[in-house]
Amino acid sequence: MAKRRINSINNAPLRRIEPDHHWRSLRQGDRVNVTLMPGFESAGVVDAVTGDATAVWVELDGGRGRTLVHVSDGVVIVPQSTTTAVPQES
């Protein structure tokens, strides 16, 4: 009995996806803004980053849970500015 051969499989090699430079600087505990799509932005805290910085776990603010984002998802993760003035009590 002959085996069926599927000829419709794409034989192109997978291309390596490189994260943006700021993905490589993310560390556990960093505050970030996550833009999943235009008009939908959320803030959160980095929970974990893979060694090659292509995937990041983010604990979203407001009790919305933990989400895993990958560079190929088209998600933008930007560290929150640390230059924002914080009111000081005197």
Image (tube, grey):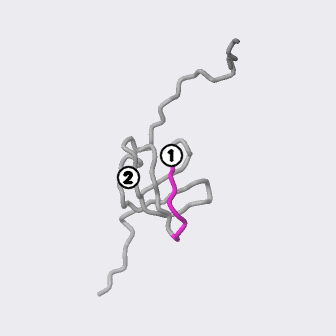
The magenta-colored residue range is 62-69
Residue situated in front as seen by the camera: 26 or 88:
26
Seen at 40% across and 44% down, the residue is: 53
SS at circle 1 = strand
Measured from the top left, where is residue 36 in percent x and y? 57, 54
Q: CA distance from mark 2 to mark 1?
A: 13 Å
Which residue is at the far front? 1
- Give left or right: position of 3 versus 75: right
**Which corner quadrant of the image does residue 3 belong to?**
top right
Circle 2 crowding by C-alpha within 10 Å: few under 14, some 14–19, many from 20: some
Q: Which mark is residue 26?
A: 2
Discs 2, 1 touching: Cβ within 8 Å: no
Residue 65 part of the magenta-drawn span: yes
Q: Quadrant of the N terminus?
A: top right
Measured from the top left, where is residue 58 in percent x and y? 46, 58
Name above or below for residue 81 compared with residue 10. below
Name above or below for residue 54 compared with residue 29. above
Name above or below for residue 10 compared with residue 90. above
State how many labels appear: 2
Mark earlier in primary sequence (2, 1):
2
Q: Quadrant of the C terminus?
A: bottom left
- Give left or right: position of 25 versus 18: left
Q: Which mark is residue 86?
A: none
Q: Which residue is mark 1?
A: 70
Which residue is at the far left? 90
Seen at 51% across and 29% down, the residue is: 15
Q: Amino acid at mark 1?
A: His
Seen at 56% across and 45% down, the residue is: 73
Residue 10 part of the magenta-drawn span: no
